[in-house]
Image (spheres, grey):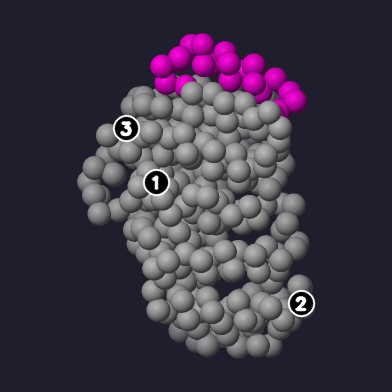
């Protein structure tokens, strides 16, 4: 089995050396590391070149001549992967030394699955870079089926390892859809997902991380990205009838939806389908109390 690590960089010099060291010193070494720098104007490229000189047979480095954006850069990196499986990495993740070893074990023992994701610990400057435990509201996504995923991403890109055969459906990545959201929906339709309940990395949560910065720009303007994404998702073949019906209704409802305003028709849609759409939403409450909580959740989603 060959494993490729796919990395996109942009002005990530501050943490890049630590990240690349954690990848290149894995107990199970990567077979290929593809790095594409999106025309950084700091010392990112010189750091990449330093590592490439140390590992010339493993690291394949590319530098874009102009800034092409996160989605296009990730599509480029994925297209260069030659491994049977591709592990996606943000530019400042810190991998635990056994990450690839454990992933290979899970792939070997779960041959019917073609996409894997795992737990992580989160680092943050506010606590002197000590680990912050994430409060989890959603159970980790497993198996297949899109469910709430048409309006809410269930897979974070830097925790994903996918079979290269999925690239025939993933590429090209639509320009204005978050790359990992696109991967999730395609995988939910075309693949089968396995969750690894083991923290295999530290994720550094800060404004310069590729994923965090891209998401935070649009966090208060989710309606437009959802509309664009819904239309992109409708072009994926093989959606099951339940999800296809939900997608058709969502496209129609969002055509007339006003951002950040309560939408009664959208609320009714979520309310009627709450037990399917929010089946993975974790609460300690049971029975009627949980149902009342889900009603509040439906109201919140109807403003998106």
* Magenta stretch bounds: 39-59
Q: Which is more N-terminal, label 3 or label 1?
A: 3
Q: Is residue 227 above or below residue 194?
A: below
Q: Is 127 rendered above or below residue 197?
A: above
The first of marks 2 and 3 along the sequence is 3
x, y percentage for residue 17?
Answer: 58, 21
Q: Residues within 10 Å of mark 2 (few under 14, many from 20)?
A: some
Report the Cα–Cα distance between label 2 and label 1.
36 Å
User: In which quadrant is the C terminus drawn?
Assistant: bottom right
Q: Quadrant of residue 253?
A: bottom right
Q: Marks 2 and 3, Cα distance to the nearest angstrom?
A: 47 Å
Quadrant that contains the N terminus: top left
Residue drawn at x 71%, y 52% is 216
Residue at horizontal 54%, vertical 79%?
A: 248
Residue where numbered disc 3 is placed: 2
Q: Is residue 139 shown to the viewer in this render?
A: no
Q: Cα distance, mark 1 to mark 3?
A: 12 Å
User: Eyeballing the image, is 149 above or below 173?
Assistant: below
Give the image quarter of residue 36.
top right
Q: Is residue 88 visible?
A: yes
- In the rendered view, does 112 fall on the left or right side of 88? left
Residue 92 bears which disc, if any?
Answer: none
Q: Residues within 10 Å of mark 3 (few under 14, many from 20)?
A: few
Residue at (41, 44) in percent of width and height: 161
The residue at 60%/77% (across/down) is 251
- Per the image, label 1 sits on a secondary structure element best described as strand
The answer to whether the residues at label 2 and label 1 have Cβ atoms under 8 Å apart is no
**Labelled disc at residue 162:** 1
Residue under pointer 2: 258
Disc 1 packing (10 Å; few <14; some 14–19; many ≥20):
many
The residue tagged with tag 2: helix, strand or loop?
loop
């Amino acid at each position: 089995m060959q494993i490729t690590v796919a990395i996109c960089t942009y002005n990530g010099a501050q943490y890049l050396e630590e990240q690349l060291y954690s990848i290149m010193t894995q107990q199970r070494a990567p077979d290929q590391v593809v790095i594409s720098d999106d025309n950084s104007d700091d010392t990112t490229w010189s750091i990449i070149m330093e590592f490439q000189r140390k590992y010339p047979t493993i690291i394949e480095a590319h530098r874009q001549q102009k800034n092409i954006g996160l989605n296009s850069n990730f599509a480029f990196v994925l297209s260069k992967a030659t491994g049977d499986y591709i592990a996606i990495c943000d530019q400042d993740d810190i991998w635990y030394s056994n990450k690839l070893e454990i992933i290979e074990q899970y792939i070997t023992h779960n041959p019917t699955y073609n996409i894997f994701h795992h737990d992580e610990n989160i680092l943050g400057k506010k606590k002197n870079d000590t680990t912050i435990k994430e409060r989890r509201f959603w159970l980790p996504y497993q198996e297949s089926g899109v469910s709430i995923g048409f309006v809410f991403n269930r897979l974070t890109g830097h925790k994903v390892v996918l079979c290269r055969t999925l690239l025939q459906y993933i590429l090209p990545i639509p320009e204005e859809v978050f790359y990992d959201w696109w991967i999730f929906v395609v995988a939910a339709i075309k693949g089968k997902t396995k969750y690894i309940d083991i923290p295999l990395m530290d994720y550094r949560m800060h404004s310069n991380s590729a994923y965090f910065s891209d998401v935070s720009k649009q966090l208060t303007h989710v309606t437009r990205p959802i509309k664009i994404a819904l239309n992109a998702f409708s072009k994926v073949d093989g959606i099951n009838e339940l999800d296809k019906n939900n997608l058709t209704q969502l496209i129609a409802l969002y055509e007339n939806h006003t951002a950040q305003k309560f939408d009664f028709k959208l609320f009714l849609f979520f309310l009627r389908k709450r037990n399917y759409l929010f089946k993975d939403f974790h609460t300690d409450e049971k029975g009627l109390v949980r149902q009342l909580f889900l009603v509040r959740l439906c109201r919140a989603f109807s403003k998106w």
